[in-house]
Image (tube, coloured by chain):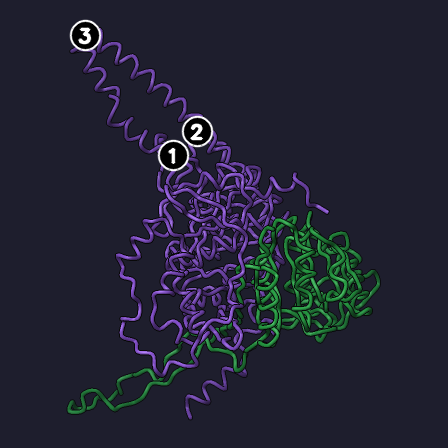
Chain colours: A green, B purple
Amino acid sequence: MSFVEYSEFIQEGDVAIIFLGHDSMMPVKVQQGSQTQTRYGVIRHSKDLIGQRFGTKVTCGKGGWVYVLHPTPELWTLNLPHRTQILYTTDIANITMMLELKPASVVCESGTGSGSLSHAILRTIAPTGHLHTVEFHQQRAEKAEEEFREHRVGHLVTVRNQDVCKEGFGVTGVADAVFLDIPSPWEAVQHAKNAMKRQGGRLCSFSPCIEQVQKTCAALADEGFEEISTLEVLLKVHDVRTITLPLPDFGPDRPLETPTDTPVPSNTSVLCKTTTPPREMAGHTGYLTFATKPRV
Amino acid sequence: MADNGDDDSQHRVNEGDYVVLKRGDIYKAVQIQKKKKTVFEKQWFFLDNAVGELYGTTFEVVTDGKLQPRKPKHIESSADAKEAGTDNRNIQDDGKSQKLTRDDIETLKEQGLNGQEIVQQLIENSTTFRDKTEFAQEKYIKKKKKKYENSVMVLRPSCRILAMMYHGREPGKICHLRYDTLAQMLTLGNIHAGSKVLVFETCAGLVLGAVIERMGGYGSVVQMYPGGGPVRAGVESFGFPSHFHDTLHEFPICHVNALLAGTLDTEAKDIDTNAGQANGDKSNLTQTDPEKAEGKGGSPDTEDQSMETSTSTDPAEDKEREEREKRREIRAQEKIVKTEEKRKKLSAAAGVLKGRNADGLVIASRFHPCPVLLGLIKFLAPSRPFVVYSQYKEPLIECYSKLREQGGAVSLRLTDSWIRHYQVLPNRTHPMLLMSGGGGYILSGTTVATDTTKAKTCSTTAEEPAAKRLKLTETTEG
């Protein structure tokens, strides 16, 4: 297993995602002799996981069952331990496409945070790309490095514990794309420009507040970036439901006819297969600002 | 570090390259061919001068349709304190403030003034320009620039650019798939290098190209196609290196059932690789339809020939007949070679599919998604994602329900993406006035191992949660 390559069977040291049902999942580090408690009972790693195919049904101690899934960056985003507020798949998907990420891309990212976007980037740029990620918080930087190793993607990423606004990304002239998710992205624009290839590249800045966006756009324009564009995306989920709608009774159709012994059968309700929106939805995550560094 | 002359060549335009032309928000995909007239945004020009320049260069269209690289952005002299007003209370919108007539402007164009200069002329000949507020002046300049500029940017194609191009120019060709929806599909489908992905699409090859781009030439992609042959026009526009095509297979869906049942014999000589051709009409197996038509109408077939030999003894005609026969033989040979090639391709694709261990499935077509999904999902290994796009919601509701019934998939989600662009300017920041009304819907999920015994009544397969159903019936009674 790795986050950048599928494998068929579960092995010691893998990270697996236990699917408990309807949006309920948990990550698990597979180890000989270990046990994991779930609401359906205990899962014994050696007996129930190791050697099994990803995707199989595992019966737990109390008799209920779960599925064991192969990890993907998307599943990881939903299950990772939060050290910071994270980016979710909707924003990640757009960032990936708008930055034109693909295998062999070299990407600079700051801040690493909890590694949600980092994992998605690594999956997209593997096997020949590289991610230079900068995190100014020491423990978070260390934790991220540890996770990348456990997830078998360490060879694709370099974590630097420094302040990107003061010291940059630690590399120059190599990046195809730069991503900023920091409080003051306008302070890092020049560093971003230096980290990017001379022939150009793409940049993205994620900011929750419009004031940050305004300052960043101004800084980008000053540094000669082109195609500056700000947008936001939201995901709307549709819950599929079969609903019952009762029909009104306006009385019999032909009231002048003599009533028969058997009453005319009529439907009292109709079943309708439709979708309903959830009660609440994410209304705002952040504004995404994209720009192109032109070739000099 | 990586900035030497060698690297540059990768970033320069070559003849034969597939590129995308850009002006403002308008894109067009073309191939660089010297001495070929290209039309873009009501202008004709030659792309010859683009060859050798770096990608991302902006060109001006000058006389004779030649391209001239523009100097790097000259910062507008907006720093000068120009005369401006405070508001529009005294500005009459009577259509008389511009002194230049349309003919005057045409004359200026003919004189060879570039866009920048024409805009300058318009400003000087506008009686109300200096009364406008600074913001209004900027807006006016921007508007005129957009109308009179004749610059073209030459871009390297990418999924992002092509998706925006198709959505802006020909959304009907891509089932109105909006670019952010495509982005969701690629990520939810975990498309990455080294995997084996099945694609069924009728989006002119845009979706297929996007998948191929994310695979980077590693792994394999099988395009399942309906009808006579795979449509891939959009894939060309991506300008992939030729070795990427080695990873691309195709398989006609008319053979899916046979493959699943294990009865598909790809060794059979008369296997047809087209849908709808029942048995052995070999002439249909070649792609060269005009050839086929000629073969039927142009050269005589055996009956006619025998008639001819009995009536004609003209040596010139004999020679002609000989040559016709030769040509027919060559064509027949070509057909045999082509058929064999196609058979080999079919066999290779079948080989890739047979193991039923594909890593991902992407569906985006005008066909009803339900049968497509239910048919193709059988080729996926367990614990792998699938993504189905539909322009409409209802067909996906059906997919969702059928999948719930038959099992084999978890985390089913029916979603659509909402996107809004912003204008960001000092004191003028707001969302754009127009936004997309819709970009289609996606059903996504993950496969799981199917039980041989269907366990429909398991407590953990939460369907439409019972609690919620009760609530609905309560409110309808209220």
Residue that mark 1 sits on:
B287
Where the C terminus of chain B falls, by quadrant?
A: bottom left
The answer to which of B156 and B105 lies nearer the viewer is: B105
> Residue pushed farthest bottom?
B478
The answer to which of B153 and B314 lies nearer the viewer is: B153
| Residue in view at x 82 percent, y 68 percent | A138
The answer to which of A253 and B218 lies nearer the viewer is: B218
Residue that mark 3 sits on:
B314
Q: CA distance from mark 3 to mark 1?
A: 36 Å
Q: Which amino acid type corresponds to the residue marked 3 in the rendered image?
A: Asp
SS for callout 2: helix
Q: Which amino acid type corresponds to the residue marked 2 in the rendered image?
A: Lys
Residue that mark 2 sits on:
B338
- Discs 3, 1 touching: Cβ within 8 Å: no
Chain letter for the residue marked with disc 2 in the picture: B
- Discs 1, 2 touching: Cβ within 8 Å: yes
Q: Which amino acid type corresponds to the residue marked 1 in the rendered image?
A: Gln
Looking at the rendering, which quadrant does residue B289 occupy? top left
